[in-house]
Amino acid sequence: MQDELLYQMQHAFPLSQHPFRELARTLGSSESEVIETVRRLKAEGIIRQTSAIFDTKRLGYTSSLVAFKVPEEKIEDAADIINAHPGVSHNYLRNHDYNIWFTMAVAPDSKLGLEKTIDILKEASGAEDAIILPTLKMFKIKVQMDTTGKRAKKEKVHKAAHKEIDLTPEHIEVIKALQKDIDIVEEPFAGMTDALGMSHERLFEIADELKEAGIMRRFATILNHRKAGFGANAMSVWSVPEEKGEEIGRQLAEFSAVSHCYLRPRYPNWPYNLFAMVHAKTQEECDTLIEEMAQEAGLREYGKLYSTREFKKQRLVYFDEAFGEWEESAKG
């Protein structure tokens, strides 16, 4: 049951008053057994968090992947300085001259903006060089580990149409609530509804609105990949002719082991413009998948950047005062 439970919770956690009861019904189990299993998986660190996953861009934030080239003796201090920014959600040491890779987001009301913020971090961390790699085209973002071993090697990737909505103060309060990790209890949303002063029905109605607008990608469980048995993740980077970027991007995104796939800019010191994050149980398995991807796409110029250390991995906290506080301290 455990593997199927983890797979389903990663795909879509039920937005209902009794979500664990729904999961139990699907799995042919009991609510109490499911809750007990989830609590154990959380205590073991296999489950990181169960919460809403939002689209940073559609919430008005400006974001980018960033790579720093940091001297080895400065890596520890540099990681601490980078991690202190509230817009850094992921930060890894990777096996490359550009060795610190992190995702950066700045709030819609940022006075510094993305590039100035990165300049400040570059100087403070002692980085020798930096590459800013914003998304030019997204082909896939779907972090879902195949805990069952039943998933096909390839999957169709569909782009959903989204309706436009104007965010109201009520929407924003719900976003603030849904981005928090839930309690593993029979009614995990009860605390939210009490704090918001609304019914479960109204909470889920607003969540559906946010999902239809593409603001909320999904409500789901995020795993600690290594503790869940997926010990290798490689950021495969590819040099693709501009005229074939979209075609090959869609092709690589169809591999189920690929969780993220984007076109990004290339530079004289960075020739790769297509990125595909590959997850597998072992590095050998990762290597084999990437070789297969290269053969299918007919690509010869590519690289594999393995993460050797995780400095930070957490959900971005939206509408957080910490963004403004960081900028004020940076000015001072």
Image (cartoon, grey):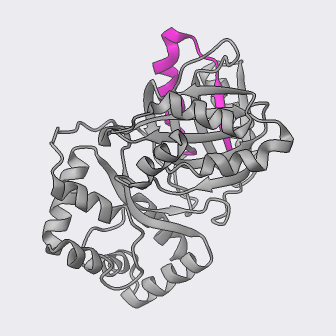
Q: Position of residue 229 (x, y in %)?
A: 67, 63
Give the left or right position of residue 300, taking residue 192 as reference. right
Question: Which range is magenta?
Answer: 233-257
Name the residue: 60% across, 62% down.
Answer: 224
Residue 38: x and y, percent? 49, 79
Image coordinates for residue 118, horizontal then vertical, percent: 57, 33
Q: Nearer the viewer, residue 287 or 18?
A: 18
In this view, which residue lies farthest toward the bottom?
Answer: 32
Q: Is residue 23 magenta?
A: no
Residue located at (61% from left, 72% from top): 45
Picture coordinates of residue 263, whole percent (x, y) = 51, 25
Q: Nearer the viewer, residue 202 or 18?
A: 202
Q: Nearer the viewer, residue 126 or 229?
A: 126
Residue 34 sits above or below residue 81 on the image: below
Q: Quadrant of residue 312?
A: bottom right
Q: Relative to 115, say whether 101 is above or below.
A: below
* Residue 262 visible somewhere in the drawing: no
Which residue is outermost to the right?
Answer: 73
Q: Magenta segment: does it hold 237?
A: yes
Q: Is residue 237 above or below residue 178?
A: above
Furthest residue toward front: 332
Number of marks drawn: 0
Would you place residue 260 above or below residue 45 in this image?
above
| Residue at left offset 44%, top offset 48% | 323
Using the rendered image of the protein, determine whether residue 69 is visible from the camera's viewpoint. Answer: yes
